[in-house]
Image (cartoon, rainbow, N blue to C red):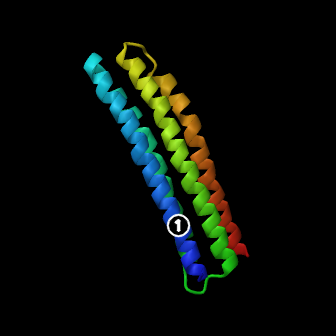
Amino acid sequence: MEPIIFAYLGVAVMIILSGVGSAYGVTIAGSASVGALKKNSGGMGSYIALSALPSSQGIYGLVGFFMVQPFLVNGITMFNAAAIFGVSVAVGFVCLFSAIRQAQVCANGITAIGNGHNVFGTTMVLAVFPELYAILSLLVLILTTGALQNA
């Protein structure tokens, strides 16, 4: 397999998995919002804010693409292609699972707000924890591209 194809395959997996995770996560939280609206329509702003949180992992996949794009050239070495493939697949999977798990935290918070509990701030704080791992995976991608520049 040509190194450039190997690298692009990793980037494709990253984009697909991070996008699917965000779409799935937003759907989980959005569904909870629809249910909560039936009980408490006054919490719409909180529902929207919490429902949008899992969308950030899809953005991380896109940022990852822009970070590796300068290396996606015909003369790419197999070492660089393998590094891009590996880190891209890792970012994709971490974003996929963190978006889904973050959505579950958000959905529970949305349900609680719908039931009249004042847990918006607490839910926002707790929802940051799954996202932290997506951010860390993106940081590893950034550090990897920095290492590739110096190699």
Quarter of the image that includes the N terminus: bottom right
Q: What's under tag 1, amino acid-wise?
A: Val
* Relative to 86, residue 48 above or below: above
* Relative to 50, residue 136 above or below: below
- Tell me which corner region of the image, top left, top right, bottom left or bottom right, holds residue 30: top left
Residue ID at (39%, 19%): 113
Q: Residue furthest right?
A: 151
Q: Residue furthest bottom?
A: 75
Q: Secondary structure at mark 1?
A: helix
* Relative to 117, residue 146 above or below: below
Residue ID at (53%, 70%): 9
Task: Determine which residue is flagged by label 1.
Answer: 11
Answer few, some or many: residues within 10 Å of disc 1's Cα (few below 14, many 20 plus, some between 14 and 19): many
Q: Nearer the viewer, residue 81 or 70?
A: 81
Residue ID at (59%, 60%): 89
Residue ID at (67%, 79%): 78
Quarter of the image that includes the C terminus: bottom right
In the displayed structure image, the side of residue 5 where residue 86 appears, left or right: right
Q: Can residue 63 be seen?
A: no
Q: Residue furthest front?
A: 1
Q: Can residue 18 be seen?
A: yes
Total tally of numbered discs in the picture = 1
Q: Residue furthest top?
A: 116
**Residue 101 in picture, x, y percent from top left:** 52, 37
In the displayed structure image, the side of residue 131 where residue 149 appears, left or right: right
**Residue 131 in picture, x, y percent from top left:** 55, 41
